[in-house]
Image (spheres, rainbow, N blue to C red):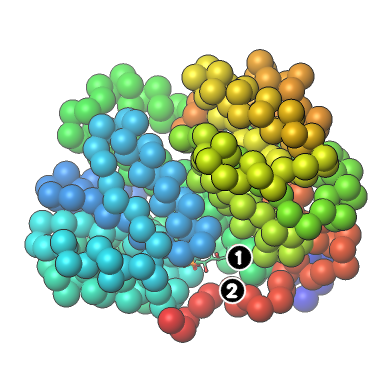
Amino acid sequence: ESASKGGYPHFMLKEIHEQPRALVDTLYGLSSDPTLREASKIMAEARRVFITAAGTSYHASLHFAVALSKIAGVLATPFVASEYEAYLPVVREGDVLIAVSQSGETMDTLKAARAFKERGAKLIAVSNVVDSAIPRESDIALYTRAGPEIGVAATKTFTTQTLLLSFLVLDYALLRGAILKSEYDEYARELSRASDLAAKSIAWSEGLAKKVSEMLRLKQSMYYLSRGVGLPTAMEGALKIKELAYIHAESYPAGESKHGPIALVEEGFPVVFVVPRDVYYEKVLLGNIQEMKARGAWIIGVAPEDTSLGEQFDLFFRVPSSHWLTTPITHTPPMQLLAYYTSTLKGYDPDKPRNLAKTVTVE
Ligand code: AGP
C-alpha cells in the first residue's frame, strides 16, 4: 500500500499534489474529445438546463451554474441529488440534466438521473470513471482524467470537474453566440493555465497550512465565507475541514452574516474568506471582513497575491492571480491542505474519515 502512495504518508496528500497532472490530463482529454461539442449541442437544443450531484461534485455543479449565468447569460438549476423529487414535477421532454459524479455510482445522483430520464429529459454525465453506472445510463458522457482517487475526500476530482464544466460553459456559450470566438480564446487561455496555477497554489500554501493547523486543531467551529463565484469554493473548503478534521464548519454567502450567523462570532472564532480576483468582490467582501473583525474573529484569507485586502487578514494564503473562472483551481488547494494537516495533527486518518464511504451506493 505504501508503494502506491508514491512516498506520501496518505493518499489524500498524494492526490492533492497530483492536481497539476490531473488538470493537464483533463485538458488534453477535452481538446481531443468531440463529445464536449455534442454535449453543448444537447444543451443548446434544450429548453432548460438542470445540474445535479452530491457533496463535492455538487460544489462543482454550483460553479458551473454561476459560470453559465455570467458567461452565457443562461440560468441553470442546480440541486442536491437527494432532493430531486422537488424538481421532478416540472421536468418534461426538452429539458436536460447534467449529472456530475466522480465515481459515477452515487445512488442519490443515479436515482435523480433515472427519474429525469423517465420524464423525457436528456442526460449528460460528468464522471471520472469510464462506463460507470451514471455514464452508462446517460445520452452522453464527459470524463475528467484525474486518475483513481483513493482518499475518501475528493480533491483532484473537484478541480478537474470545475475545469471540465468551465469548458462546457464556454463551448455552449460560443455555440449559442453568447460570446465571440476571440472571447472564447481568451477564456480558454486562462483555463489552460490551470495546471500551473494549481502547482503554484499548492507550493505557496503548504508551509502555512501546516502552521495554521496547529491553531485550528483547538477550534470547534468556523465559517467559510465568500460571494458569487467564490462561494462554491468556500463551500468545498468547509466540507473538507468537516469530514477530515471533524471541526464544525459552515459556509454561506458573506452577505448573510448580519442576518443571523454573526451571533456566534466571538474572540478568536476562525473565519476563512475566499476572495476571487475581482474588484467588485474585493469591495463588498471588505465590509464583510470588517464586521467579523469588529467581533474579534480570526480572519484567514485565501486570496490572490495582488489583492487589496491583504492587510485585513490575520493569516493570508496567497494564491496566484488569475481569472475568476479559475477560482476553484487556485483557491481550493490551500483549504485541502489545511484540512489534511489539521486532521493528521489531531491524530485522524484523512484517507478514512469516520462514518464516511468513498462512494455512497445507498439512498
Ligand atoms: C467529498 O469529499 C466526499 N467524499 C463526498 O461529498 C462526495 O463528493 C460525494 O459523495 C459524491 O461522490 P461522487 O462524486 O462520486 O458522486
Q: Residue at x 35, y 74 (%)?
A: 110
The correct choice, above or below, for 176 with respect to 238 in the image is: above
The residue singled out by tag 1 in the image is 149
SS of the residue under disc 2 = loop
Where's residue 237, x and y in %? Answer: 63, 49
Q: Which mark is residue 358?
A: 2
Dots 1, 2 in contact, CB < 8 A: yes
Pick the front one: 337 or 182: 337
Pick the front one: 175 or 56: 56
Residue 323 visible in the shown view = yes
The correct choice, above or below, for 42 with respect to 258 in the image is: below
Of callouts 1 and 2, the N-terminal one: 1
Where's residue 133, x and y in %? Answer: 37, 76
Q: Residue at x 74, y 23 (%)?
A: 312
Q: Amino acid at mark 1?
A: Glu
* Quarter placement of the C terminus: bottom left
